[in-house]
Image (spheres, grey):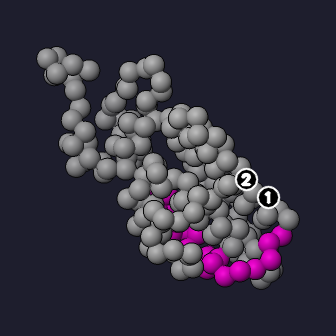
Amino acid sequence: MSKSLGNILNPLDMIQKYGADATRLSLIMGAAPGNDVKLSEDRIRGYKNFANKIWNISRFVLEQNGATEVTLTPEDERLVAEAEEAVHTATKHINAFRLDLAGDALYQFIWTRFADQILEESKPMLKGESASARSSRAHALYQSLVIILKALHPFMPFVTEAIWKELPHKNTDVLMVAPWPVQ
């Protein structure tokens, strides 16, 4: 990008158009060490779609009333462990100062595994299974959402904080001070 060529994107304009979280995430995800940041409006628009996906995931999970404590089935325990493992991977990248890889690990888990697979597999289960199976899956989805929001907060603080305020049961009113989900 060059100011003299006129092909530069003003981040403030992009924030106005697509939101601070989408712009912030596009800057983080495109900032691999040793490389120039390839900022484009299409890339920022894609991360705005990701922010919308997080809103939709949250709305779906909260509609299931999974905030009450129940005993999880072994399958649902594995789903929660999978979310924790994605955060563990992101944590390793953060500790190595590779924020681009950490953000990508979370992005891939949330979009591909959680939204496209886990939620889609859960929809019939949440309609037709026994009450205990429904409660277990709803709670597993809720626990996973809490884990995802905590891990995604450093990358997308405004969206995650707004969703956090809607959660019925949480250990703190402000997500920013919530403990990191994986030790």
Q: Based on the displayed image, in which of its 4 quarters is residue 125 positioned? A: bottom right
Residue 46 versus residue 183: which sits nearer the camera? 183
Would you say residue 136 is visible in this rendering? yes
Disc 1 packing (10 Å; few <14; some 14–19; many ≥20): few
Tell me the amino acid under the disc marked 1: Arg
In the rendered image, residue 43, in percent from the top left (x then y), is placed at 39, 35
User: Which residue is depicted at the point 60% across and 54% down?
Assistant: 115
Tell me the amino acid under the disc marked 2: Glu
User: Which residue is depicted at the point 51% across and 37% down?
Assistant: 99
Q: Secondary structure at mark 1?
A: helix
Q: Based on the displayed image, in which of its 4 quarters is residue 26 positioned? A: top left
Query: Image height check: is 162 above or below 95?
Result: below
Give the residue number, with chain letter if any, for mark 2.
82
Say whether marks 2 and 1 touch (CB < 8 Å).
yes
Tell me how far mark 2 sits from mark 1, CA to CA: 6 Å
Would you say residue 105 is visible in this rendering? no
Q: Is residue 65 part of the magenta span, yes or no?
A: yes
In the rendered image, residue 10, in percent from the top left (x then y), is placed at 21, 35
Q: Secondary structure at mark 2?
A: helix
Query: Image height check: is 136 above or below 39?
Result: below
- The quadrant in which the C terminus is found is bottom right
Query: Over which residues does the magenta segment extend?
Result: 52-73
**In this figure, what is the number of numbered marks?**
2
In the rendered image, residue 40, in percent from the top left (x then y), is placed at 33, 31
User: Which residue is depicted at the point 58% across and 40% down?
Assistant: 95
Q: Based on the displayed image, in which of its 4 quarters is residue 9 positioned? A: top left
Give the residue number, with chain letter if any, for mark 1.
78
In the rendered image, residue 82, in percent from the top left (x then y), is placed at 73, 53
Residue 117 versus residue 38: which sits nearer the camera? 38
